[in-house]
C-alpha cells in the first residue's frame, strides 16, 4: 500500500536508510515513509506464524508479480540481514497492523511485545521502487501530482492459490499517454522484484474494473482524454489474500508505512 | 513494406541466406521473401545518388525508429560486406522499383544495368525480424493469420527532417490483447535496429488515424473487442519520405521483396 509522498523536513529526507530505520525505531518518524532514504528499496511487510509460511512462500512463488518477496526472516527472528544492517522487523516500521482471525484488531507503532518464536517475516517489493525509476526518466505520476494515494482495484484476474491463500489480483493504476505507457513498460520491466511490468493497459473492463473513478483502495485520479490507464500488480494483493485466509494471527505494515531497506533500487534492476 | 508470408516449397525454405540470395540472383525466386532463410534478417532497400546520401543518413540518424539503417554501401559499390558474403545489391533482391523525380517508373527483377558509380545503397531494418521474435514467444500476428499484408497508416507524428527528407511517420498496426501488447513491448524493445518498441498503442486518433479499417498501405485486419491496436514505426516511412523528396533517381525494393542477409535476427537483440 502506498500514500503520496509527504514533504519531509530536510534533515529527515537526508537520513541514510539505516538512520531512517533508527528514527522510526525511536518513534521520531510516524506515518508514511514515502520520500525517506531516496534511492533505497522500501518493502511491504507480512508476518505469519510458521505453519502458514510454506503455503505463503508457495503463493508468492506462484504469483511473483503481485507478491515479489525480497527477504524472509528465519522463524522467530526479527532480522532480515540481506535487507539491512541492524534492521529490526518489530520496531523499524513507523506503523503496524495486527490481525486476528482475518480482522484488523489494532494499529500500533511497534510490535516487539507481540513477537513470538514461531513468527516468520516476509518483506515484499513495493511500487515505490519502480515509481522512482519512472520519475527519474521524466514520466509523470498523476497520484503524486495530485497529492493522493494511487488508485487500486480488485480485478477478475485470479491469483494461483496455495494452501489457504488465494483470491483476485489487486492492481494499481497510473494514467499515461500511450508513448509514455510504452516507456513505462520498458522501465518497469527491469524491476521484476518490485512488481515489474504492467499486467494490463487500456480496456479496464477486460480485467473486471467497471468504474475507474471508484477504486477499491486509494483515491481516484484524473485521466486525460489522451491517456490510457496502465495497471500494475499491487502489493495490496498479498495483504488482501492474507486477510481473506483469516489466519489466527498476522502482522502487516500500516498503509504507506514501509520497511526501509539498505538495498538500492538500482540493485534490483535485472538489466 | 511487407506481404504475408507465402507458403514455400520445402526446398526453398531450407536454403541458407546465401543460397536464397543466389536463387534470387538467378531469377528462381520472385515475389515475397517472407519465410525464406528463417532466423535471418531481411532488409528494406533504398538506393540514392551520393549527393543525397549525407542528408538521408542524417534523416535516419534523427529518425531511428522508422529508419533503422543496418548497412550502407560505399559509393558505386554493390556490396555491403557486413550484411553478407557474396551479396550483390543490384541482383539479389527478387523485385526492384525504379524511381525518377519521385515517380515509380519501372518494376524489375534486377538493376545491374542501371547501376552507377555515384549510387549509395542503404539497407534498413524490417519488421520481419521483430515479428519472428513475437511468434517465437507465442504472440499472435493477425495479418499472418488472415493471410494479408500488415495494415499501415500515415500518422500525424512528424519525422525530424534532414535536407530534402521529411514528412509524417508511417506505422504498422498489430492488434493484441493488453497483456500480449505489454509482452510485445518487452520483446520488440530488444530489437532497436529493426524498428524496436511500438511508438503508440490504443487511441489511434491521438496519432491522426481516423479509421483503422482504412489503412493507407496494406490490408485491414480484424480487431477483437478485447484487443487494442499496437503501432510500430514502419520501413515504409523512408520510402514515402524519399518519394516525397522527388530525387532525380532512386531504387527501392518492391513491396515484400526484401534483401536477405547473413545476419541472424538474434544478433540484433541488444539484450
Image: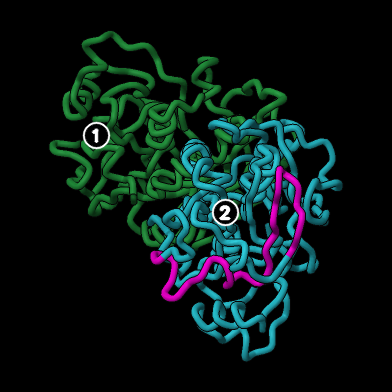
Chain colours: A green, B cyan
Q: Residue at x 28, y 51 (%)?
A: A72
Q: Residue at x 39, y 55 (%)?
A: B270
Q: Specify the quadrant of the image occupied by residue B271.
A: bottom left
Callout 1: residue from which chain?
Answer: A
**Residue pointed to by mark 2:** B47
Q: Residue at x 51, y 58 (%)?
A: A164
Q: Is residue A222 magenta?
A: no
Give me the C-alpha separation between circle 2 and circle 1: 75 Å
Q: Specify the quadrant of the image occupied by residue A263.
A: top left
Relative to B97, say whether A72 is above or below. above
In this rendering, do the residues under marks 2 and 1 share a single chain? no
The answer to whether residue A33 is visible is yes
> Is disc 1 surrounded by few (<14), some (14 to 19) or many (20+) residues within 10 Å?
few
Tag of residue A112? 1
Q: Specify the quadrant of the image occupied by residue A25.
A: top left
The quadrant of the rendering that contains the N terminus of chain B is: bottom right
Given the current orientation, which residue lies at the most extreme bottom position? B11
Q: Residue at x 57, y 37 (%)?
A: A181
Given the current orientation, which residue lies at the most extreme left position? A86
Callout 2: residue from which chain?
Answer: B
Judge left or right: residue A140 versus residue A113.
right
Amino acid at each position: 500500500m502506498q500514500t503520496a509522498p509527504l514533504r519531509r523536513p530536510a534533515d529527515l529526507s537526508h537520513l541514510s536508510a539505516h538512520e531512517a530505520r533508527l528514527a522510526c525505531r525511536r518513534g521520531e518518524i510516524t506515518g508514511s515513509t514515502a520520500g525517506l532514504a531516496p534511492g533505497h528499496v522500501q518493502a511491504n511487510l507480512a508476518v505469519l506464524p510458521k505453519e502458514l509460511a510454506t503455503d505463503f512462500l508457495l503463493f508468492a512463488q506462484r504469483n511473483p508479480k503481485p507478491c515479489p518477496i525480497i527477504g524472509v526472516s528465519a522463524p522467530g527472528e526479527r532480522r532480515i540481514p540481506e535487507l539491512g544492517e541492524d534492521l529490526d522487523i518489530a520496531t523499524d516500521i513507523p506503523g503496524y497492523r495486527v490481525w486476528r482471525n482475518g480482522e484488523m484488531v489494532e494499529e500500533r507503532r511497534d510490535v516487539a511485545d507481540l513477537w513470538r518464536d514461531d513468527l516468520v517475516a516476509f518483506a515484499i517489493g513495493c511500487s515505490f521502487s519502480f515509481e522512482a525509476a519512472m520519475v527519474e526518466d521524466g514520466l509523470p505520476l498523476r497520484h503524486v501530482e495530485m497529492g493522493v494515494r494511487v488508485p487500486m482495484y480488485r480485478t477478475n484476474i485470479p491469483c494461483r492459490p496455495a494452501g489457504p491463500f488465494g483470491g483476485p489480483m489487486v492492481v494499481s493504476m497510473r494514467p499515461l499517454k500511450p508513448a509514455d505507457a510504452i516507456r513505462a513498460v520498458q522501465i518497469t520491466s527491469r524491476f521484476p522484484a518490485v512488481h515489474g511490468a504492467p499486467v494490463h493497459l487500456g480496456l479496464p473492463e477486460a480485467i473486471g474494473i467497471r468504474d475507474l473513478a471508484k477504486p477499491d483502495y486509494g483515491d481516484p485520479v484524473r485521466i486525460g482524454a489522451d491517456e490510457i490507464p496502465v495497471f500494475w500488480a499491487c502489493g495490496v494483493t498479498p495483504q488482501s489474500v492474507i486477510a481473506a485466509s483469516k489466519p489466527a494471527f498476522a502482522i502487516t505494515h500500516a498503509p504507506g508505512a514501509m520497511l526501509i531497506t539498505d538495498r538500492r533500487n538500482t540493485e534490483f534492476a535485472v538489466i
